[in-house]
Image (spheres, rainbow, N blue to C red):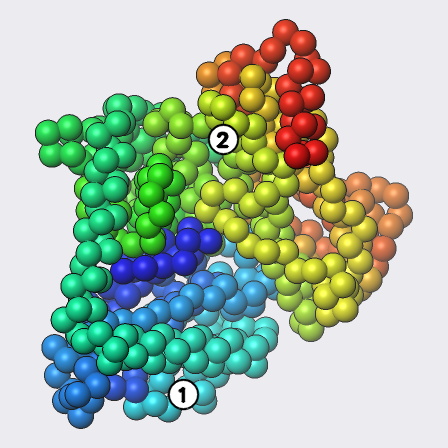
């Protein structure tokens, strides 16, 4: 019915998790029960993202345990910075199976009759083939998610008390119907389009958008996309669903909440066994964060909307037995007809706020040496792409660093004659003066004095660059001053 819009890949895919719990739990749900899901093959996205789901029973029949007395469901999703797997931070560059990526919550009964199943959940976290390195924090975060859900349950109950169940349900339907009509108005103005989006690995996401004007609907067809990959860049269907939902929601000018009504006019076709519909036990950790960005870029190109933003979340994880940390690093957004791209922002499917430098250095044995604008990395054009960032982190004790990023080989595309954004780059500058170049998806051990350097891509430009190379730059400076 409504979802926070600020991290589209997380929240746009939550409905899939809820539907899976409903499908598999059915009439067995009871008041006081809460479930946890992160299994990418049963409603999840990747293992660090744990969705906690609580049914809302009719308060007038709380003793009635029939499933038809469930009125609504509330859910919360949290990215757990450590959930096990073969690398600290649970975002391994080299995972090849889902087992190597951490602990699986497959429709897990997290609370029963109001009791948090702490002992059972602790065993699940610690007895997996690659267990969590920090189960106490996992349990605390899960308690917080249960509490968040309870707040949701209480607020739904308050709405029903204030307005009556019939009114609440009617407005819930109206919210979805309104979103559906808003997307149909967008589809009325769209033309057919297609695009083949090449990733750094050489895998290709092919998408064709076909508009049915008579029915005011569209088909988004990914037929021809590369087969399932041996790497972890496979994306389950829930991620594809979230990316399509995001793109079409951004085309709507009206202020509507993110909800499943947006997808009613859209038929999504994904070939089974492709990198966008992999079969278990394929690894998927990068599919959620990186392939989601590639799907978005492919759709915007097919629709001719704007040049590509950086097309990557620039994921960085580091840690050891005592410390685990994960962040995404901002980059440049793409330009469009009438606007420049923004510099050093979170683009499209990500929107994670970075940890404050003081907190980062207080909690972890690292020093943030630089976080700055990577001047000139945005693509040239009538409207310039936004610049990426430079981020330098110095380590004070041994750790393992993992990166998951794209556009280290294929630059973010420009549009309408605009030039592509600059490639990103990752490296470690060693304390002894040597440099270790990292691939987009890579890992290395670091020691005291070593510095991780991440240079994020710029966004693509839009339109042919003006004859005077300083003209576009002056316009951007004017905007920044404003």
Q: Which image quadrant is residue 454 in?
A: top right
Number of on-image labels: 2
Q: Nearer the viewer, residue 111 or 144?
A: 144
Residue lying farthest to the top in this orientation: 467
Q: Nearer the viewer, residue 385 or 9?
A: 385
The answer to whether residue 128 is left or right of residue 61 is right
Q: Nearer the viewer, mark 2 or mark 1?
A: 2
Q: In this rendering, is residue 77 above or below 35?
A: above
Residue that carries the numbered disc 2 in the rendered image: 308
- Give how far apart the Cα atoms at labels 2 and 1 are: 45 Å
Residue 427 visible somewhere in the drawing: no
Q: Which label was assigned to residue 116?
A: 1
Q: List x then y, in percent, for residue 296.
A: 41, 38
Residue 471 visible somewhere in the drawing: yes
Q: Earlier in the sequence, mark 2 or mark 1?
A: 1
Q: In this rendering, is residue 159 above or below 112?
A: above
Local packing at callout 1 (Cα closer than 10 Å; few below 14, some 14-19, many 20+) is: some
């Amino acid at each position: 019915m409504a979802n926070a819009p600020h991290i589209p890949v997380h929240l746009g895919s939550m409905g899939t998790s809820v539907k899976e719990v409903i499908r598999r739990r059915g009439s067995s749900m009871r008041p006081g029960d809460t479930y946890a899901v992160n299994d990418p093959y049963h409603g999840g996205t990747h293992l660090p993202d744990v969705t906690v789901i609580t049914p809302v029973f009719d308060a007038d029949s709380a003793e009635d345990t029939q499933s038809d007395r469930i009125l609504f469901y509330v859910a919360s999703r949290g990215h757990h910075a450590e959930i096990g797997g073969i690398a600290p931070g649970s975002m391994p560059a080299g995972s090849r199976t889902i087992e190597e990526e951490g602990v699986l919550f497959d429709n897990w009964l997290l609370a029963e009759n109001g009791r948090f199943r702490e002992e059972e959940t602790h065993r699940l976290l610690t007895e997996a083939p690659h267990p969590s390195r920090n189960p106490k924090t996992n349990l605390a975060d899960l308690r917080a998610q249960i509490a968040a859900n309870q707040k949701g349950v209480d607020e739904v109950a308050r709405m029903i008390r204030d307005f009556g169940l019939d009114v609440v349900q009617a407005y819930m339907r109206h919210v979805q119907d309104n979103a559906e009509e808003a997307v149909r108005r967008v589809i009325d103005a769209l033309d057919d389009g297609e695009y083949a989006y090449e990733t750094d690995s050489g895998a290709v996401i092919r998408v064709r958008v076909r508009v049915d004007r008579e029915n005011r609907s569209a088909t988004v067809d990914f037929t021809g996309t590369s087969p399932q990959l041996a790497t972890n860049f496979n994306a389950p269907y829930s991620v594809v669903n979230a990316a399509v939902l995001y793109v079409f929601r951004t085309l709507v000018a009206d202020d509507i909440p993110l909800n499943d009504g947006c997808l009613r006019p859209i038929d999504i076709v994904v070939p089974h066994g492709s990198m966008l519909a992999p079969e278990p036990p394929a690894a998927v950790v990068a599919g959620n964060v990186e392939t989601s960005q590639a799907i978005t870029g492919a759709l915007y190109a097919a629709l001719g909307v704007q040049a590509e933003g950086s097309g990557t979340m620039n994921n960085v994880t580091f840690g050891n037995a005592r410390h685990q940390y994960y962040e995404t690093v901002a980059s440049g957004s793409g330009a469009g007809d009438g606007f420049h791209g923004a510099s050093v922002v979170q683009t499209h499917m990500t929107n994670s706020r970075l940890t404050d430098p003081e907190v980062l250095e207080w909690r972890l044995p690292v020093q943030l040496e630089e976080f700055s604008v990577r001047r000139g990395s945005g693509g040239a054009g009538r409207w310039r792409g936004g610049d990426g960032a430079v981020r330098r982190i110095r380590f004070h004790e041994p750790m393992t660093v993992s990166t998951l990023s794209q556009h280290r080989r294929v630059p973010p595309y420009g549009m309408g004659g605009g030039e592509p954004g600059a490639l990103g780059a990752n490296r470690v500058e060693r304390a002894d003066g040597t440099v270790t170049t990292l691939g987009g998806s890579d890992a290395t051990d670091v020691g005291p004095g070593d510095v991780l350097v991440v240079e994020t891509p710029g966004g693509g430009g839009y339109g042919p660059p003006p004859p005077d190379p300083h003209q576009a730059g002056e316009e951007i400076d004017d905007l920044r001053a404003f």
